[in-house]
Image (spheres, rainbow, N blue to C red):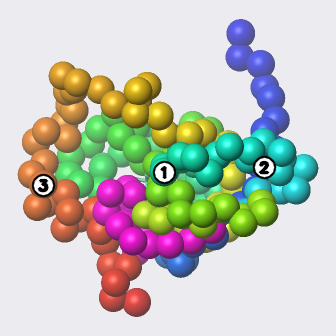
Amino acid sequence: MNDMFAIEPIGQIHSPHKNPKETPIQPVFASGIRGTVTVDDAYADGLLDLDGFSHVYLLYRFHRAEQVKLRVRPYLQDEERGVFATRAPFRPNHIGFSVVRLLSIEGTTLHVEDLDVLDGTPLLDIKPFIARYDLRENVRSGWQEEVGDDTARRRGVRDYRSGH
Ligand SMILES: C[S@@+](CC[C@H](N)C(=O)[O-])C[C@H]1O[C@@H](n2cnc3c(N)ncnc32)[C@H](O)[C@@H]1O
């Protein structure tokens, strides 16, 4: 049964990215790009002990993705793929996640690096990156294996350095 439920953001992500087309497509292509995550005061207690982790998952809503598309052309390739075989924003529920470096925490503000997220993005959750749980061996990467590292980097960083 598909019950509806509401999710209330717990904060907001602030980044230098204003234009979706000029925003890197993953943290790995956003190296050194800094921003902040402001967590609402009501959730301050939940930040206890987070400063022991070098990386965190930010879960958020792609609030500027208005459409849902079940087939998309990924940023790295000019072929249609099923949206669930991609990280495209145009998915049902518009949920995104990014593994970013946690630099410091000041009160309810997290200073983070490697942001691939638009400024003003609503934050849904934060989880620590835990190597013991999250690193995998013998990985297959589907259609991504058809894309060379140089092409991925060239397409993935996009234009953020140009300032246009
Ligand atoms: C391919 S998605 C991947 C994002 C995330 N790391 C993931 O795997 O879910 C990255 C692109 O989403 C777009 N984007 C980022 N924040 C967004 C937002 N709040 N609303 C709509 N699109 C957004 C930008 O164009 C960015 O280049």
**Which residue in the protein does label 3 denote?**
149
Q: Is the CB atom of the residue marked by disc 1 within 8 angstroms of ligand 1's nearest atom?
A: no
Does residue 10 appear in the picture of this structure? yes
Mark 2 vs mark 1: give the one in front: 1
Which of the two labelled residues, at mark 2 and mark 3, occupies the earlier sequence position? 2
| Residue placed most toward the observer, 132 or 36 | 132
Does residue 98 appear in the picture of this structure? no
Q: Which residues are magenta?
A: 21-36
Return the x and y of residue 85 as percentages of the image width and height.
34, 33
Give the class, few, some or many, for how many residues have Cα within 10 Å of label 3's Cα (few <14, many ≥20): few
Q: Report if the CB atoms under discs 2 and 3 are less than 8 Å apart.
A: no
**Mark 2, secondary structure of its residue:** loop
Name the residue type under label 2.
Answer: Ile
Residue at far bottom of view: 163
Could you say which disc has been placed on residue 54 in the image?
1
Q: Report if the CB atoms under discs 2 and 1 are less than 8 Å apart.
A: no
Name the residue type under label 1.
Answer: Ser
Return the x and y of residue 57 as percentages of the image width and height.
53, 44
**Which residue in the protein does label 2 denote?**
10
